[in-house]
Image: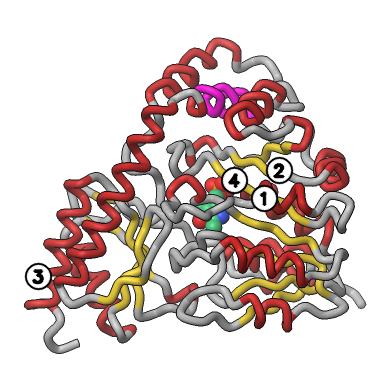
């Protein structure tokens, strides 16, 4: 075959480029960005200070082993630092896992409305994506297990899930893990772990440990992009069995975590009170936002994250609501790309921002919906 120009592997061109939450609207002065689930209060003060202090040392390469950050994570979460690998966002870790354990001829399994990065990075690796129907916008363990076949190499579960907000109870996650063959890697994505209020919740570290010597096939991923307010620095991490840690340390680029992100991350971990206040804020305002939208006649799916999924019943209504919000400077996330075109995902912002959304959507339901 003679190509007329360079060609990537065929699977690459099946990828739909990731579209992030918008952050500007033409002709609107004050923008309220509630489209990317960033924390409501910006970066923690100590993290900002650490970032500024790092400026004078930016000519130095960072510590490629991310030693201080892994140590701080180990202390904060009671985990062995040797079993932690950091990444430029948890997205980088997800991608590394896909490339290392999947590839041409492999399948990955995810639930129908699971996080879009799983599909994108699977295609990058060359794997086929198997999407499994959900029940009530919640992952269905029996259906997930039934979808696992001889080609399956990875199974991704965000718990809580983005964009649905749904949470699988601990016993269900354990049942999922118990039903997987040892050669399938279970990736538990706990990006929203800090926001969960259900008492029996366990983000995944216990299941990682339970897999030791019994497949070594569970990884938990976490991020600094949500409650820690550092999405712009790109910082995430995972807790994994030694064999998976070894694989990730072979393939990651030697300096994948930059110095500024590392020191800001360590400082953010020290802001326990600030984090606790952010969690309390989210718990309160997630409920207030939910109640306000429901009072306006909008269905809201139960969420354990820092966002809610508002269901307008029909794609045209959701599109009209989105346009109505944008005219008022409120940017939320349309969900057509997730197969949920009747829904909008709304991040829990400050109290004022939540109030603006409730007021605007209340007006939309009274006046703006006609003719849709
Ligand atoms: C936001 C998010 C992430 C975090 O991505 P980063 O690369 O760490 O910013 C991971 N998983 C889910 C489900 C998310 O919503």
Camera-near label (2 vs 3) is 2
Does the CB distance between marks 4 and 1 fall below 8 Å?
Answer: yes
Q: Secondary structure at mark 2?
A: strand
Dots 2, 3 in contact, CB < 8 A: no
Residue 304 place in picture, x, y as percent: 42, 58
Q: Residues within 10 Å of mark 2 (few under 14, many from 20)?
A: many
How much space separates mark 1 and mark 3, taking CA atoms? 42 Å
Q: CA distance from mark 3 to mark 4?
A: 38 Å
Secondary structure of residue under mark 3: helix
Q: Is residue 61 left or right of residue 227?
A: right
Say whether marks 3 and 4 touch (CB < 8 Å). no
* In contact (CB < 8 Å): disc 2 and disc 4: yes
Q: Quadrant of the N terminus?
A: bottom right
Viewer-closest of 203 and 340 = 203
**Residue 363: mark:** 3
Quadrant in the picture for the C terminus:
bottom left
Give x and y (percent) for residue 145. 72, 78
Q: Report which residue position mark 2 lands on.
A: 239
Q: Is residue 360 left or right of residue 59?
A: left
Q: Main secondary structure of the magenta part?
A: helix
Residue toward you, 230 or 164: 164
Q: Which residues are magenta?
A: 258-267
Kindly report the distance in space between the C-alpha atoms of the residues bearing marks 2 and 1: 5 Å
Q: Locate residue 15: give its quadrant.
A: bottom right
Please report the residue visible at 64 percent of the width from the left and 64 percent of the height from the top: 173
The residue indicated by pointer 4 is 222
Residue pictured at 21% horizontal, 50% vertical: 353
Which is nearer the N-term, disc 1 or disc 3?
1
Per the image, the residue denoted by label 1 is: 220
From the image, state whether disc 3 or disc 4 is nearer to you: 4
Label 4 packing within 10 angstroms: few (<14), some (14-19), many (20+)? many
């Amino acid at each position: 075959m003679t190509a007329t120009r360079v060609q990537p592997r065929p699977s690459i061109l099946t990828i739909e480029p990731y579209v992030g939450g918008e952050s500007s609207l033409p002709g609107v002065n004050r923008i309220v960005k509630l489209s990317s689930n960033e924390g409501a209060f910006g970066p923690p003060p100590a993290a900002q200070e650490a970032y500024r202090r790092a400026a004078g040392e930016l000519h130095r390469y960072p510590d490629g082993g991310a030693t201080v950050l892994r140590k701080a994570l180990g202390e904060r979460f009671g985990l062995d630092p040797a079993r932690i690998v950091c990444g430029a966002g948890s997205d980088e870790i997800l991608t590394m896992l896909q490339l290392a354990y999947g590839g041409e001829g492999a399948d990955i399994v995810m639930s129908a409305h699971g996080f879009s990065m799983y599909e994108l990075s699977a295609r990058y690796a060359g794997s086929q994506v198997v999407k499994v129907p959900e029940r009530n916008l919640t992952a269905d363990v029996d259906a997930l297990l039934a979808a696992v076949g001889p080609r399956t190499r990875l199974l991704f579960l965000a718990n809580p899930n983005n964009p649905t907000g749904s949470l699988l109870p601990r016993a269900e996650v354990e049942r999922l893990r118990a039903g997987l063959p040892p050669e399938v890697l279970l990736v538990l994505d706990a990006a929203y772990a800090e926001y969960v209020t259900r008492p029996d919740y366990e983000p995944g570290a216990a299941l990682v440990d339970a897999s030791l010597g019994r497949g070594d096939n569970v990884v938990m991923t976490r991020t600094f992009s949500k409650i820690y307010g550092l999405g712009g620095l790109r910082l995430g991490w995972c807790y994994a069995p030694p064999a998976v840690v070894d694989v990730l340390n072979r393939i990651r680029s030697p300096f994948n975590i930059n110095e500024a992100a590392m020191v800001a991350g360590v400082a953010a971990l020290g802001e326990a009170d600030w984090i606790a206040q952010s969690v309390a804020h989210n718990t309160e305002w997630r409920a207030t936002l939910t109640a306000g939208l429901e009072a306006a006649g909008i269905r809201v799916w139960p969420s354990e994250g820092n966002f809610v999924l508002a269901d307008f019943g029909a794609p045209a209504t959701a599109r009209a609501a989105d346009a109505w919000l944008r005219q008022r400077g409120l940017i939320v996330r349309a969900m057509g790309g997730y197969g949920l075109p009747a829904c909008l995902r709304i991040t829990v912002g400050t109290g004022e921002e939540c109030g603006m959304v409730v007021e605007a959507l209340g007006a939309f339901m009274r006046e703006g919906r006609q003719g849709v």
